[in-house]
Image (cartoon, rainbow, N blue to C red):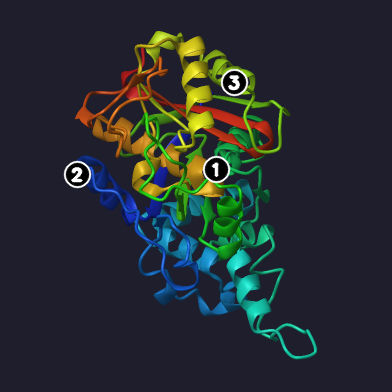
Amino acid sequence: MTRFPYVTAYTCVNAAGIGVDGLLQALRENRGGLLRPDGNLSDLDTYVGQVDGVDSVSLPSNLAQFDCRNNRLAELALGHSDFADQVVQARQRYGAGRIGVLLGTSTSGIASAELAYQNQRDDGSLPDNFNFRTTHELASLSDYVRLRFSLKGPHFTISTACSSSAKTFVDAAQLIAAGLCDAVVVGGVDSLCETSLRGFNALQLLSPEPCRPNDKARKGICIGEAACFVLLEREGPSDGRQIVLRGYGESSDAHHMSSPHPQGLGARLAMQQALDSAGLAPDQISYINMHGTGSAQNDRVEDAAIAAVLGSEIPCSSTKGWTGHTLGAAGGMEAVIALICLEAGLVPGNLNMKEPDDLSRCNLVEQTFDRPLIHVMTNNFGFGGNNCSLIFSRQDVMA
């Protein structure tokens, strides 16, 4: 048995595609999902990555108290790519108490609280149908998923800004290695809400056009929503698929509440730790999925950090041009993209990039192309200097 946990199933929904097959098709067709916001957000001069069909999703009747946009988004993803069936089969193999649920989010069900306050009574009380604990509270997400599958292992929600759902992979690997779990459902969900959109608008970070990570003339970020889930197990799948979480690294620069360290020290440390834990040299990495938000400072700092740790030859791109920045779901969402790229042999380009930044030192991919991949790194660097780098590998072709 390998010391690396196996990836046995995964699923996702985002603005670019519904399910793994839908997202793969969007990546191949260079078709992003960013559109102008509507409704209460239509006054904002930006683009968002909104998932279609969320409002029509129904939760199981016994979990109706969890009804909010964030959990509907989760349910939509759980219904695709045979993920739910794989979790049920894992529960039958290991038992409910041996499967954990570790999920990341940033906004959680804030939209439900926004709606409640918009409809508060004259005396200031909130509507009776608003349940903070099962909708807005961070634990709502992991509680919903564990109850949805009747799982009884360790369960909690991680919220470390943009690295939230990337960190779930690290904790899950450690639970499996410690013998506390045989399998863990990881990933994350974040849904659009006014609080986050208007907050980033107040910071003057929103792009007035579809975001252009790593582009010379990039103008900021675009916010998106997404749900993604991955099943990690101590044993490999029976279908011959041999993808493992090969390495991971975490750090905290503690440099500034919202800005990265100017020299990217925390980012460099996370990437180096990931390489060390995987036992890999920099030139063994086949592709790097960058955090690449589209903001001038963050893209430039990450570019310099990658060049310092891994050199300037490895193909690099940010996929936020397809999905937008999905905040607490970004780490898990881009981990799923890394898995898709490994299985499909695909290197995505930097969608919307017209001319690379003059100061860029990395090998920025302009057009999507096919290439067999063995080891893929994905980076997520959040507010407060919460950094996480993951490496996924094709076990069946590893030396």
Left or right: residue 343 compared with residue 395: left
Label whose residue precedes the other's in the sequence (2 or 3): 2
Q: Describe the element under mark 3 as helix, strand or loop.
A: loop
Q: Which residue is mark 2?
A: 29
Q: Which residue is mark 1?
A: 183
Q: Amino acid at mark 3?
A: Gly
Pick the residue in front: 65 or 205.
Answer: 205
Q: Amino acid at mark 1?
A: Ala
Tell me, for residue 276, which label it has, or none. none
Mark 2–mark 3 CB contact (< 8 Å): no
Q: Amino acid at mark 2?
A: Glu
Label whose residue precedes the other's in the sequence (3 or 1): 1
Please report the residue visible at 39 percent of the width from the left and 43 percent of the height from the top. Answer: 211
Left or right: residue 113 compared with residue 232: right
Label whose residue precedes the other's in the sequence (2 or 1): 2
Mark 3–mark 1 CB contact (< 8 Å): no
State the image quarter where residue 111 is shown.
bottom right
Left or right: residue 228 compared with residue 26: right
Q: Position of residue 222 (x, y in %)?
A: 44, 49
Between the C-alphas of marks 3 and 1, the distance is 34 Å
Instruction: Say whether residue 112 is visible.
Output: yes
Q: Nearer the viewer, mark 3 or mark 1?
A: 3
Please report the residue visible at 30 percent of the width from the left and 23 percent of the height from the top. Answer: 373
Please report the residue visible at 58 percent of the width from the left and 38 percent of the height from the top. Answer: 163
Instruction: Say whether residue 5 is visible.
Output: no
Q: Nearer the viewer, mark 2 or mark 1?
A: 2
